[in-house]
């Protein structure tokens, strides 16, 4: 198995590879995506096309997609995306498979990605758009020091946009 890009006490975080789609596909459900602007891929082939776009974004250094896996079992846990790497305001996107919710995985993983991106990319701040009624994600943004800076209406829900200062700013 390849070496992880980042690690937490319980998780290994790998950069996305096409082989990961086998584990991702069955976890993306309509209930999981109710607070996301996108819908689940209707076929594995459709998901492969999305995966190809992620690899292109990685090559162009506009996005990073981190695949979260349990350190001991290698079970796929979820994904964290860091988008708009070429700008001063990076954007987080994330999801955890439903049977792994409420176990602290996302908090553990996002904190490590947040620290990495703050140090390596040094953004002005992070954007984190969240459905107004997605209280778990809102708590996560606030845990990272985020404050609501804007609102917007998506096709499926109303959202708030958090601005999260970089980790380095939080230390000073």
Image: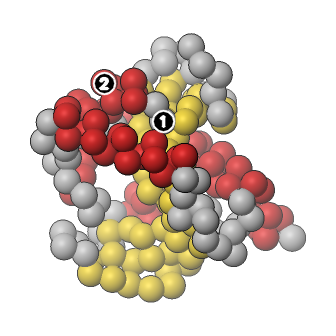
Q: Nearer the viewer, residue 171 or 41?
A: 41
User: In the rendered view, would you say 80 is above or below 139?
Assistant: above
The residue sitting at 56% across, 14% down in the picture is 1
> To which residue does mark 1 refer?
16
**At which x and y percent is residue 9?**
66, 30
| In this picture, residue 68 sits left or right of residue 143 | left
Asked if one can make out residue 34 in the rendered structure from this viewpoint, the answer is yes
| In this picture, residue 166 sits left or right of residue 50 | right
| In this picture, residue 129 sits left or right of residue 88 | left
> To which residue does mark 2 refer?
22
**At which x and y percent is residue 110?**
57, 49
The residue sitting at 43% across, 21% down in the picture is 75
Q: Nearer the viewer, residue 11 or 80?
A: 80
Quadrant of the snapshot with the C terminus: bottom right
What element does badge 1 sit on?
loop
Say how the picture is coloured. Answer: secondary structure
The residue sitting at 19% across, 53% down in the picture is 39
User: In the rendered view, would you say 143 is above or below 25?
Assistant: below
Asked if one can make out residue 105 in the rendered structure from this viewpoint, the answer is no
């Amino acid at each position: 198995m390849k070496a992880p890009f980042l690690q937490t006490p319980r998780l290994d975080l790998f950069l996305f590879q096409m082989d990961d789609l086998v584990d991702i596909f069955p976890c993306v459900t309509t209930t999981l995506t109710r607070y996301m602007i996108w819908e689940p891929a209707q076929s594995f082939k459709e998901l492969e096309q999305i995966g190809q776009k992620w690899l292109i974004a990685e090559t162009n250094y506009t996005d990073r997609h981190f695949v979260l896996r349990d350190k001991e079992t290698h079970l796929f846990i979820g994904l964290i995306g860091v988008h708009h790497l070429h700008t001063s305001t990076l954007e987080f996107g994330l999801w955890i498979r439903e049977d792994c919710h409420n176990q602290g995985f996302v908090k553990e993983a996002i904190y490590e990605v947040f620290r990495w991106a703050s140090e390596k990319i040094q953004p002005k701040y992070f954007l984190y758009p969240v459905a107004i009624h997605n209280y778990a994600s809102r708590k996560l943004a606030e845990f990272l020091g985020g404050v609501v800076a804007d609102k917007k209406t998506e096709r499926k829900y109303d959202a708030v946009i958090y601005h999260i200062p970089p980790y380095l700013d939080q230390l000073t």
